[in-house]
């Protein structure tokens, strides 16, 4: 399941929210034992001198970097 979601996101699927992915995973796990739960937590990356970059499950990391850059520039004025 995790590889399917990773592949879908790599191919441009943006509608797959964390809640959707969690629901699919729960339903699949009801059919077959799951050994590794799907991690839909936001990605957190510390950025030296700026803060922590939080990237939601369904967002491309590059988009998160651009948004953080814009916010940093706005706050610096």
Image: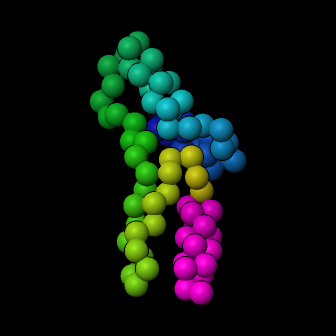
Please identify the quadrant where the C terminus is shown. bottom right
Res 69 seen here: no
> Height in image: 44 above or below 76?
above
Q: What is the residue that sits farthest to the front in this orientation?
A: 77
Against 62, residue 10 (above or below) is: above
Residue 62 on image: x %, y %: 60, 65
Q: Which residue corresponds to the image point at 61% horizontal and 78% vertical from the top-left?
A: 74
User: Is 68 included in the stretch rendered in magenta?
Assistant: yes
Q: Which percent across, then down, holds residue 41?
A: 40, 46
Q: Is residue 11 left or right of residue 75?
A: right
For the point 55% across and 79% down, the residue is 75
Q: How many marks?
A: 0
Q: Position of residue 63 (x, y in %)?
A: 62, 62
Image spot of residue 33 (x, y percent): 32, 19
Q: Is residue 32 above or below residue 8?
A: above
Magenta-colored span: 61-77
Please report the residue visible at 67 percent of the width from the left and 42 percent of the height from the top.
13
**Left/right of residue 34 with respect to residue 24 in the rendered view:** left
User: Quarter-wise, where is residue 43 in the image?
Assistant: bottom left
In the rendered structure, the answer to whether residue 72 lies left or right of residue 43 reads right
In the rendered image, the vertical position of residue 63 relative to residue 8, given as above or below: below
Q: Which residue, as the protein is rendered here, is positioned at the far right?
A: 12
């Amino acid at each position: 399941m995790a590889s399917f979601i990773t592949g879908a996101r790599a191919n441009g699927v943006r509608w797959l929210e964390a809640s959707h992915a969690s629901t699919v995973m729960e339903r699949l796990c009801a059919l077959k034992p799951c050994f590794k739960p799907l991690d839909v937590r936001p990605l957190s990356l510390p950025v030296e001198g700026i803060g922590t970059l939080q990237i939601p499950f369904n967002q491309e990391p590059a988009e998160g970097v651009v948004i953080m850059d814009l916010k940093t520039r706005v706050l610096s004025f």
